[in-house]
Image: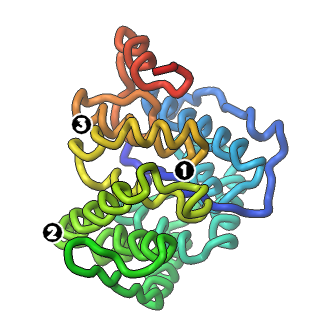
């Protein structure tokens, strides 16, 4: 099955809460769902539920998107659930919803098939493109020798925009984005060397605590391997959502082994059973180092 989109979390907030019983719902595998799709859908639900609990029961637009993706992958029969999740995502953040819709379109020609008609999705897609055209991002001012002008919050806000400049809104250019990714990583390295720790919630706030992780995530295996212990410490210190660390672990394993531990990388197989104990001992957050 061609997947909708690689699901991701941002540390965001909202004022809507799900009931406690909703956070324990895991559907049975349906006949039309393959084993790999079922496992992927369940893993998305587990990680989403955990993220909601860590967010004190508040449900963000990213959570609603992930729920819609999970229910679609699992082929849940209640169409209204998926449609309502998408509506809540759009209601909370029209801009981010538009980004998700455009990314979903690029990953799958018929996203949410069976839940949205082709005409409905095409209308969403056209609206998303219009939102994208209105979003004018400005370049970060970088002074010589990686000296950066502006407060950490200003710098991180601009880095967040630069990270997506050639990845989104139908403006994909891998070559240009790779150049930006390297420049962004130089800035993060400089900030990390100045601060001496992960730049997370206590310094940047909840809305920007993901940015350093995002830049690291987009800079290849060598950088990921270097910063993985830093990310782990950040999670343990409540500076970064645990879902981000798990995605980085899975990305490293996919590069190195061709499989993953936590199930965050849709389309990639989970680690074989005979490898689980050693991987859990090496990477799991509950294991003392």
Q: Which percent across, then down, holds residue 85?
A: 67, 58
Disc 3 and disc 1: Cα gap in Å?
A: 24 Å
Is residue 260 depicted above or below 231 in this figure? above
Q: Which mark is residue 255?
A: 3
Image side of residue 15 versus residue 169, left or right: right
Label 1 to label 2: alpha-carbon separation: 29 Å
Cα–Cα gap, marks 2 and 3: 20 Å
Q: Position of residue 242 (x, y in %)?
A: 55, 40
Residue drawn at x 54%, y 28% is 31
Q: Earlier in the sequence, mark 1 or mark 2?
A: 1
Q: What secondary structure is found at the residue carrying circle 3?
A: helix
First-in-chain label (2 vs 3) = 2
Q: Nearer the viewer, residue 103 or 280?
A: 280
Q: Can you identify the residue that label 1 sits on? A: 69
Residue 119 visible (yes or no): no
Mark 2 — residue? 175
Q: Position of residue 288 (x, y in %)?
A: 51, 20
Disc 3 and disc 1 in contact, CB within 8 angstroms: no
Neighbourhood count class around disc 1 (C-alpha, 10 Å): few under 14, some 14–19, many 20 upward: many
Image x and y of residue 47, in percent:
58, 39
């Amino acid at each position: 099955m061609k997947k909708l989109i690689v699901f991701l979390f941002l540390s965001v907030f909202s004022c809507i809460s799900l009931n406690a019983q909703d956070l324990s719902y895991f559907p049975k595998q349906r006949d039309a769902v393959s084993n790999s799709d079922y496992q992927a859908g369940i893993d998305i639900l587990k990680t989403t539920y955990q993220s909601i609990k860590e967010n004190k029961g508040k449900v963000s637009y990213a959570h609603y998107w992930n729920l819609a993706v999970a229910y679609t992958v699992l082929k849940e029969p209640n169409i209204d659930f998926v449609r309502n999740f998408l509506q809540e995502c759009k209601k909370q953040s029209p801009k981010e919803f538009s980004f998700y819709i455009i990314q979903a379109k690029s990953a799958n020609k018929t996203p949410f098939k069976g839940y949205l008609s082709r005409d409905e999705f095409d209308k969403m897609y056209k609206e998303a493109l219009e939102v994208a055209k209105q979003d004018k991002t400005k370049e970060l001012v970088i002074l010589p020798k990686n000296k950066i002008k502006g407060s950490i919050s200003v710098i991180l806000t601009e880095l967040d925009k630069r990270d997506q400049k050639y990845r989104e809104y139908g403006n994909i250019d891998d070559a240009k984005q790779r150049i930006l990714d390297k420049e962004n990583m130089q800035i993060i390295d400089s900030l990390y060397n100045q601060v001496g720790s992960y730049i997370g919630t206590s310094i940047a706030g909840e809305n920007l605590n993901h940015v350093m992780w995002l830049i690291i995530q987009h800079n290849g295996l060598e950088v990921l391997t270097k910063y993985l212990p830093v990310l782990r410490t950040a999670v343990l210190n409540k500076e970064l959502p645990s879902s981000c660390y798990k995605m980085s672990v899975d990305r490293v394993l996919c590069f190195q082994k061709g499989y993953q531990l936590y199930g965050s990388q849709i389309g990639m197989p989970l680690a074989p059973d005979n490898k689980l104990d050693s991987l859990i001992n090496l990477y799991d957050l509950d294991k003392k180092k």
